[in-house]
Amino acid sequence: QAGGSTDPDPEPDPDPTPTYGNTGVNLATSGTASSSISYYSEGWTRYYTSNAIDGNESTKFWSSAGPSAGDYFTVNLGSQKQISKIKIVMDANDCPAGAVVEISSNNSTWTQIGGTFSSQGTITVDAEGETAQYVRLRHTASTSNWQQIFEFYVYEYGVVEGTWKPVYNDEIDA
């Protein structure tokens, strides 16, 4: 059409319904981390909480003591986000004797997602689009083993396929 039109293409994709799921974006890398147990230092090396959300599994947060029941490691995403999955990669020996994964919108009221985990090097929990600003690993049992978290992933929930963007005739004819 010569002059162009602002009407959308009259024959869009027959199934424009988007599919939602794990986008692969790790929201934790742009957040902040904190722990109820201080970090361990060895010589000039510091095992800060931020090491567990830097996107690099060769760095780690290493606690300066074994966790007690109630101790936690929290990631603040900065604002409310939809979450698809949480994956926490830990040392197979320095891992929780018992722990749960929880989410919160206000850092005071927490909701457990998934079950209780113990003696596992890696924990993966499906959040299925839950919305939260805070995600934490909370210990439910004490252990003398110091906590080592290599990476704390919080994956974004969003459109993964099937999106449809209208194409205007003036975009084609230009």
Image (cartoon, helix red, strand yellow):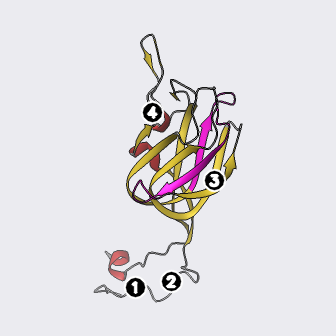
Which residue has dot 4 on it?
Answer: 49
Q: What residue type is labelled 2?
A: Pro
Q: Can residue 84 be seen in this view?
A: yes
CB atoms at circles 1 and 2 under 8 Å apart? Answer: yes
**Where 61 falls versus 124 (above or below)?**
above
CB atoms at circles 2 and 4 under 8 Å apart? Answer: no
3D distance between C-alphas at marks 4 and 1: 50 Å
Q: Where is residue 88 in the image (x, y as percent from the top left)?
A: 59, 42
Residue at the image point whose x is 39% and y is 45% from the top: 30
Of callouts 4 and 3, the N-terminal one: 4
Which residue has dot 2 on it?
Answer: 12
Q: What residue type is labelled 3?
A: Val
3D distance between C-alphas at marks 1 and 3: 41 Å
- The N terminus: image quadrant: bottom left
* Number of the front mark, 3 or 2: 3
Q: What element carries label 2?
A: loop
Q: Is residue 24 visible?
A: no
In front of the other: 80 or 35: 35
Of callouts 2 and 4, the N-terminal one: 2
**Where 164 falls versus 64 (above or below)?**
below
What residue span does the magenta drawing correspond to? 85-109
Which residue has dot 1 on it?
Answer: 8
3D distance between C-alphas at marks 4 and 3: 21 Å
Q: Where is residue 158 in the image (x, y as percent from the top left)?
A: 50, 64
